[in-house]
Image: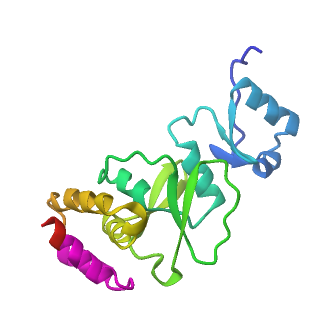
Amino acid sequence: MTRQATVSRPAGLAATFTYSEARDAGISDRRLYSYRDLGYVEAIGRGLYRWAEDVDSDPNLLEIALRVPRATLCLTSALAHYDLTDIIPPRTTFAIPRGSRIPKLHSPVEVHVFARQTFDLGRTDLKIAGGVSIGLYSAERTLIDVIRLRHREGPEVAWEALRRWLRRRCSQPAALIKMAKPFHGAERAVRNALEVVL
């Protein structure tokens, strides 16, 4: 099939959109699938699409952000974002609050369930595409999680991340210890980790 010269995006339809949003914007099933087959639109999840011109955004992150509104990048995915590890995560690692529903995703993911009372501590937003963002834990919160969950992630991952963080001018061990207090047993674990690497 030859590609048409241009396709104009309907006004009000975002770069990433759902099947229902396409229908509401006046794009029929037939036209939507034609756009997909011609390469103007890319399916990035079940009933989830993006315009092919939006190539700078990560389709996995887009799917997660749109399907799991409270998803927050954590552990190895957050460490990689902050350049605190050399590990390239094979799956996107994110956390959700305890009791949340996990929808079926096409993207390779690893989901962690964190306590609701501490879920938002150190949580920020990371813009990933026009108007779409995903949660991201701060470097300090990520370190606390990696240290307290070192039995899952591996102590060497935690120690290396902590060493890298300590080499940065802005690192403040006292602030890290303070942030760890609300997490059961984490303050002691962080103090011990600092003793190990210092």
Residue 58's place in the image compared with 97, above or below, is: above
Q: In terms of depth relative to the viewer, which is nearer, 133 or 143?
A: 143
Residue at the spot x=38%, y=72% of the render?
A: 122
Residue 176 magenta-highlighted: yes
Left or right: 155 with respect to 54? left
Rendered image quadrant of residue 67: bottom right
Residue at the spot x=27%, y=58% of the render?
A: 161
Where is residue 38 drawn, in percent x and y?
Answer: 73, 24
Q: In terms of depth relative to the viewer, which is nearer, 92 or 158?
A: 158
Residue 67 visible (yes or no): yes
Left or right: 87 with respect to 198? right
Where is residue 190 drawn, in percent x and y?
Answer: 26, 75
Magenta stretch secondary structure, dominant:
helix
Q: In terms of depth relative to the viewer, which is nearer, 118 or 52?
A: 118
Residue at the spot x=69%, y=47% of the render?
A: 17
Left or right: 20 with respect to 54? right
Left or right: 147 with respect to 194? right
Which residues lie in the magenta part?
A: 172-194
Residue 172 visible (yes or no): no
